Image (spheres, rainbow, N blue to C red):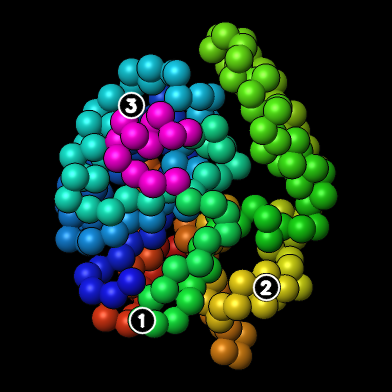
């Protein structure tokens, strides 16, 4: 993939209760991102997504803006741990493509791996077991067959359980495992890996290898994004 700027974002965690954060992303699409050719969203666009049958009226302005944006730009989406139920119906509605995790692209004639990042946190065995459960096709089919209100109640319970579990975990457990990172990059045949999830933005080098971590968004610090243009990566985040 050559020619034109490519942007990468993740972990926006757009929430119906925080319309100002949604507005921030809309502004980003209409201004900074308008100059790019491709936009990759590497998971957790939403704080929670319970199925494409949700009318999500609070996000109507966002969907309208994204639809217009996708008419002139390539938009690609990879599910995160919060919005893994985003499906083809929403993708068709907005005009983006859904990518598997991991996914390898080519930048400057070199392979680059994209991930959300949760699979790299291999020390968090409880989370990985939960992830395997909710990513199971049968589990998702049964969950989506329930009324939306019931799904919301289940999600609230799971979220409360998750917050309680996280409060008792060491921060290192919720970060990537270096050995898993190296093994993943070897398996994918790449020297560059881009991911989010950990909310620890930065650019890390280990010999020939480069790992770029996308930051999360907030109303306080605004957008966090990675740009690739003319063979160069630039990470924009006020914490870096």
Residue 90 visible somewhere in the drawing: yes
Given residues 97 and 11, the one toward you in this image is 97
* Mark 2 surroundings within 10 Å by alpha-carbon count, few (fewer than 14), some (14 through 19), many (20 or more): few
Where disc 1 sits, the SS reads: loop
* Mark 1 surroundings within 10 Å by alpha-carbon count, few (fewer than 14), some (14 through 19), many (20 or more): some
* Mark 3 surroundings within 10 Å by alpha-carbon count, few (fewer than 14), some (14 through 19), many (20 or more): some
Q: Which residue is mark 1?
A: 108
Q: Is residue 235 highlighted in magenta?
A: no
Q: CA distance from mark 3 to mark 2?
A: 38 Å
Mark 3 and mark 1 lie on one chain; the one further toward the N terminus is: 3
Which labelled disc corresponds to residue 96? none
Residue 154 percent coordinates (x, y): 67, 18
Q: CA distance from mark 1 to mark 2?
A: 20 Å
Q: Is residue 90 highlighted in magenta?
A: yes
Q: Which residue is mark 3?
A: 59
Residue 167 visible somewhere in the drawing: no
Where disc 2 sits, the SS reads: helix
Residue 221 percent coordinates (x, y): 38, 51
Q: Quadrant of residue 74?
A: bottom left
* Quadrant of the snapshot with the N terminus: bottom left
Q: CA distance from mark 3 to mark 1?
A: 36 Å
* Quadrant of the snapshot with the C terminus: bottom left
Residue 137 falls left or right of residue 31: right
Which region shows up in magenta? 87-98
Q: Residue at x 54, y 52 (%)?
A: 100
Q: Quadrant of residue 6?
A: bottom left
Q: Which residue is mark 2?
A: 187
């Amino acid at each position: 993939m050559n020619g034109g700027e490519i942007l990468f974002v993740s972990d926006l965690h757009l929430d119906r209760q925080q319309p100002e954060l949604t507005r921030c992303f809309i502004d980003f699409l209409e201004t900074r991102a308008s100059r790019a050719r491709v936009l990759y969203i590497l998971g957790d666009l939403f704080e929670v997504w319970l199925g494409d049958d949700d009318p999500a009226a609070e996000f109507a302005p966002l969907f309208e803006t994204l639809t217009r944006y996708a008419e002139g730009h390539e938009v690609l989406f990879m599910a995160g741990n919060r919005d893994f139920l985003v499906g083809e119906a929403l993708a068709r509605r907005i005009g983006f493509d859904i990518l598997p995790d991991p996914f390898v692209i080519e930048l400057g004639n070199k392979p680059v791996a994209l991930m959300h990042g949760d699979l790299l946190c291999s020390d968090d065995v409880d989370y990985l077991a939960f992830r395997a459960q909710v990513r199971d096709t049968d589990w998702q089919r049964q969950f989506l067959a329930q009324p939306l209100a019931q799904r919301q109640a289940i999600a609230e319970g799971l979220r409360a359980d998750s917050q309680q579990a996280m409060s008792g975990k060491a921060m290192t457990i919720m970060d990537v495992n270096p050995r898993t990172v190296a093994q993943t990059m070897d398996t994918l045949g790449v020297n560059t890996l881009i991911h989010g999830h950990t909310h620890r933005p930065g650019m890390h080098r280990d010999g020939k290898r480069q790992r770029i971590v996308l930051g999360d968004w907030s109303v306080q610090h605004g957008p966090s994004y990675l740009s690739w243009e003319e063979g160069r990566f630039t990470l924009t985040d006020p914490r870096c």
